[in-house]
Amino acid sequence: MSDINLSKLALNNGGCVKPLIIDASLTNGTGLMNPSIFIDGDKILVNIRHVNYTFYHSEKKIFQHQWGPLTYIHPEDDLHLRTTNYYCELNEDLTIKWITKVDTSSLDKEPLWEFVGLEDARIVRWNNKLYLTGVRRDTTTNGQGRMELSEIVVENNTVKEISRFRIPAPNNPNSYCEKNWMPFLDLPYHFVKWSNPTEVVVADPETQSCKTIFVGKQFDFHRDFRGGSQIVSVDSGYIALVHEVCLFNNDVGRKDAVYLHRFLHWDKKFNLTKYSKEFSMMGGHVEFCVGMCKRDSNFLITFGFQDNAAYVMEIPQKTVMDLFND
Amino acid sequence: MTNLQTLINEYILDTENPVTNFNLALHYHNLNQTASAMSFYLRTAERTHDKLLSYSCLLGASICYSTQGCRNFTVKSLLRNALITLPDRPEAYIMLAQHHEHEARKTTNSDEAIKSWHDCYMISCLGERFGIDVRQPLYINIDIYKPYALTFERAVSSWWCGLCNESKNLFDELLKNYGDTMDEAYKNAVIGNINHLNSLKN
């Protein structure tokens, strides 16, 4: 675990952390996680991922589940790990103004694998179209994951998915799972597919294709940087919040994990130039961030805590920049 | 929501403190946000040195999963951990016995039902013998403990385990000892069972 708690840093520097809650009558009380945030003109948009499981993590290994210290508890009569997405608009004080489930019904097909739905969807607006972009793994019988671009339309407090583009994997069409690509907020259809070495790809919904346009130099670092929030423009280039996974087995071979987080910085030419100190989001061992944008002199950052709770944080940009190593 | 905000801030400033975790768990539970509540209950249980707080949180976490439905292995896993933590308290025995009773009644598999009835009987016997310490109130507000609850579970399950005389005697004792004080639902069940067993005899 890191000694730095980003939420505490936010609070101690004039920021805040607010809960993102969906009424339990809509969710059966199960996990709310991995929200994404985007400022769309004068509106603050958030997508909250809802899952049909409740994550169990015995962080101190004292009260482990019979299935191990880390396990996903879904209904015993439904082995699917189901995701639905809730779109909401926030008030200026980051409380929820209104919320609705994203209607995907016109494009849904019978799932072929256990993970169902669009996972960890980031919100972007590109070429005047509003998108959710995340990974879907239910279209093949082996759970192959591909990033998808889902165009959504917001009308009269309803949100409907009107198109779905399954982005092919560039270079290796047979790769098993492409996920956590980080979309550039200001560069339409551009993603950081991989951070170290940085690989930038561009998807093209018209031609249903995707190509790599940049591969950077390998940074000498002991863990993988994995996506991550959207990529946010700053004066000196780009910044994003990424995670690192320490996966291990306990003494009897059951899986366990700790996630750490960092900010990465790229220059305007996509060269990875520096990384920040590592931190936790809010003191949990498993946390995940897929949302980040700028508001005035602050960043808004959204994250999930143990797959069971969702939060939005406001933190001064200066506080974030101070975390970068010299 | 304002109170929740205060509790979140207190937690963030002291994330390893069992009290800040517990306060957040309780508040989320009151909002029926059972996934969020479960996370903070479990974090509290693993961080406190107060065994009664730990025990209370494990019961709370089991209620969260029970409320979500169809997570029986996890409910039982948490209740077993509660039992291990404070084997002299009655609540975990009662909840576990009731859970086995519900499982026995729900399943359509007769072998599974018999196993669940035997588990229910075993847990109620152990609970009557060892789960007797109610000197301190729990840290969570649950209406589980009744002085007759485990005897009732033993009375019900013993019949299904083939111990019919024991079952009848226990129901008679329950009516005699607690007939004036027991909850209406329990009383109706006791009388119903006595009438049913008498009708079988005739």
Image (cartoon, rainbow, N blue to C red):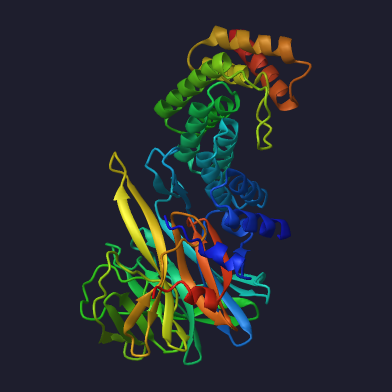
User: Which is nearer the eye, B106 or B181?
Assistant: B181
Residue occupying image coordinates x 52% and y 43%: B42
Q: Position of residue A36 (x, y in %)?
A: 51, 72
Q: How many marks?
A: 0
Residue occupying image coordinates x 60% and y 79%: A44
Q: Where A113 falls versus A265 (above or below)? A: above
Residue A106 in view of the camera = no
Residue occupying image coordinates x 31% and y 54%: A247
Q: Is residue A295 left or right of residue A240?
A: right
Q: Where B129 falls versus A85 (above or below)? A: above
Q: Position of residue A13 (x, y in %)?
A: 60, 70
Residue A205 occupies quadrant:
bottom left
Q: Position of residue A118 (x, y in %)?
A: 43, 69
Q: Position of residue A20 (x, y in %)?
A: 60, 64
Residue A272 in view of the camera = yes
User: Which is nearer the eye, B126 or B201?
Assistant: B126
Q: Where B174 falls versus A193 (above or below)? A: above
Looking at this view, name the residue that lies furthest to the front.
A326
Quadrant in the picture for the N terminus of chain A: bottom left
Residue B57 occupies quadrant:
top right
Looking at this view, name the residue that lies furthest to the right.
B180
